[in-house]
Amino acid sequence: MLRAGFGLLVLVLGLCCTWCPGQGSDEAEYVTCGSVLKLLNTRHNVRLHSHDVKYGSGSGQQSVTGVETSDDANSYWRIRGKRDGDCTRGEPIKCGHVIRLTHVNTGKNLHSHHFSSPLSNNQEVSAFGDDGEGDDLDTWIVQCGDALWEREDAVRFKHVGTNVYLTVTGEQYSHPIRGQKEVHGMISANSHNYWKAMEGVFIKPSLPPGAGRHDEL
């Protein structure tokens, strides 16, 4: 179950490696399908975060924010294909590939839609669905500079359904999530929408990049 939480997920993933910035090996230099990780906004130094707190306006769905702390368990996301079986477990993610990001502790997918975000009046980004199943507005294109998403790269995530970029511009919430930053969607590609893979459990590639059959996650 996706809701079982990060600790249980680590036990059942198998064939994985733990990685922190500045560590790793040649075989573990890519972000891979099925891995669990935290994403850092490089401009504002906050990690992509969600929790069982709903927006008080807009869609009323589960809120997505940015947090400065690096050890919060609600900042883990699992990399999945746009459909189950659409990417091979352990295969490096290609630049231009369409993915879903599933919040480990609540089982909801990173999502956007045509609602205004509560602080900046940009486009709302929420967490949506149940047990990893949502709808077509849960998909994002990974934009990076080479053929594959390398862990050291700063990348952008472009929303497939509405063409906005996953962004932080610094607006800060008060009660009940005081100090957390607003995460929203913006049409423009700029320095506020770069993200970098940070702490996580990464599935090792079992075959060279691009090889192998497509198994379900």
Image (tube, rainbow, N blue to C red):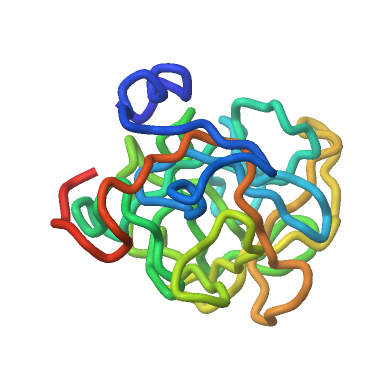
Most distant residue in the front direction: 26
Horizontal side, residue 43 vs residue 50: left or right: right
Question: Which of 197 and 158 lies nearest the eye of the viewer?
Answer: 197
Total marks in image = 0
Residue at horizontal 41 percent and vertical 23 percent from the top: 10
> In the picture, which quadrant includes the N terminus?
top left
Asked if residue 51 is positioned above or below residue 153 in the image, the reply reads: above
Horizontal side, residue 10 vs residue 119: left or right: left
Asked if residue 94 is positioned above or below residue 67 in the image, the reply reads: below
Quadrant in the picture for residue 198: top right
Residue at horizontal 39 percent and vertical 17 percent from the top: 8
> In the picture, which quadrant includes the C terminus?
top left
Residue at horizontal 64 percent and vertical 67 percent from the top: 185
Residue at horizontal 63 percent and vertical 40 percent from the top: 23
Question: Which of 105 and 93 lies nearest the eye of the viewer?
Answer: 93
Q: Position of residue 47 (x, y in %)?
A: 70, 44
Q: Position of residue 132 (x, y in %)?
A: 34, 41
Q: Position of residue 70 (x, y in %)?
A: 73, 33
Q: Position of residue 17 (x, y in %)?
A: 45, 33
Quadrant in the picture for residue 24: top right
Question: Which of 6 and 92 lies nearest the eye of the viewer?
Answer: 92
